[in-house]
Amino acid sequence: MPRVSVIIPAYNAAATIAGTVESVLAQTCQDFEIICVDDGSTDATVAIIKQFGERVRLIEQANSGPAAGRNNGARNSSGEYLAFLDADDLWASQFLERSVAALDSDHYLSLVYCNCALADSEGVALDTSLVGKGFNHAPSLKELLTQLWPIMPSAALVRRSAYEACGGYRDALKGASFRFEDTDFWIKMREQGPFGYIDEPLITWRFAWFPKQLKRLPDYSKALHVFEAYLQERYGVSAAPLVDARMRAPRSILATIGLKALRDGDRPRARAAFARAIRVDPYRLKNYLRWMRTFLPHRLARSLSGGKARRARSDRAYQE
C-alpha cells in the first residue's frame, strides 16, 4: 500500500496535464500512486495520460465536475494520505516529502497545506505568493466560516481517515456552486481535526484566465443562493463574505499581473491585464485608471505603480 494516493481530476487539460504528472514523478518522496480521473474530456487529455503507461492509472467518467472526480479517485485508491492535485498545477520536488513528514509528526492533524507561488496561464512566474499577512497560519473553524482562506486543493495533503469521516467532497456542490466545493471541504475537514501549515511555496498555482483562458470564468453570484442556504442551516452564518471574496479574486490577480508588467516596462501585457480585469468587474474604477496609465511614458507609469512587487493578499488572490 502506498503512503500517498495522488489524485488528478482532469477536464480538457491537454495543455498542462503532462507537466503536472511529471512534477509528481520528480518528487523526492516516491512512495505514491498516481490516479488521473478524466472528467469527459473532448481534447487529447486521455491520450497524453496514456503515454505515461503503468506509472499512471487512468479512470474515465462522464463529465461530473471536479468534486466527483476527486471522490472517484479516492474510492479507487489505497494510500494512507490523499493528495488532490489539479491538472494545471505543479509541485516542487519536496512537496510530498515535507507534507508527509508534517502529517506523520502530528496524528491529530486532519490535513497539512503549504503556500503557493503564482504563475499565469502560460506558466510565467508572477513573483508573488498566495498567502499574505494575517493568513500565514493554520485556520480555526471560525476563520474558515468567516473568511475565504487561501488553501488550494493542490497544496494540501489529506489524512484518509479524516476524509472518510467527513464524507469527502460534496458532489451536490456543482454547476453554479461548484467553485465552493473546496471551501466546503475545508470546513468539513476542520471539524475532524486541526490543520498544519507549511509557510513555503511548495507548489505553483496557475491562474487559468490570463493571458490565455484555459477555463471559463464562473458566475460566482449564482453560487450564493446554494451555499448560503447550506451555511445558514448548518452553522448559522452567511456565505456572502466568502462569495464576495471569491468574486474579487480574479480582478485582483489580474491587477497584480498588470502592475508587475508596468514595472517591467511591458505596457501591452499590462494593458491587456487591466482590460481583462475591467471585463471581470466593470464597476472597479481603479482598474480603468490603471488601464489609462499604460498609455503614459514608461518612467511616469512605473513611478505611479510603485517600485517593489506587491505580495498578493490571500483574501483577494484566492481563486481555484
Image: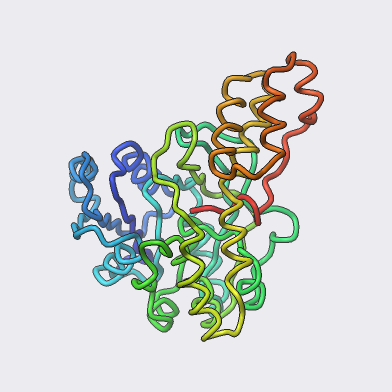
Front residue of 80 and 169: 169
Front residue of 23 and 293: 293
Rendered position, 183 above or below 52: below
x, y percent for residue 129: 63, 46
Instruction: Write the residue at 57% across / 31% down.
Output: 275
Horizontal side of 82 relative to 76 (left or right) equals right
Instruction: Write the residue at 43% across / 65% down.
Output: 177
Horizontal side of 20 relative to 245 (left or right) equals left
Front residue of 139 and 40: 40
x, y percent for residue 125: 56, 34
Instruction: Write the residue at 52% across / 86% down.
Output: 233
Q: Farthest residue to the front: give it.
A: 283
x, y percent for residue 255: 64, 38
Rendered position, 183 above or below 21: below
Q: Farthest residue to the top: give it.
A: 297
Quadrant including the N terminus: bottom left
x, y percent for residue 282: 60, 42
Count the numbered circles shown: 0
Front residue of 179 and 56: 179
**Colour setting:** rainbow
Rendered position, 248 above or below 234: above
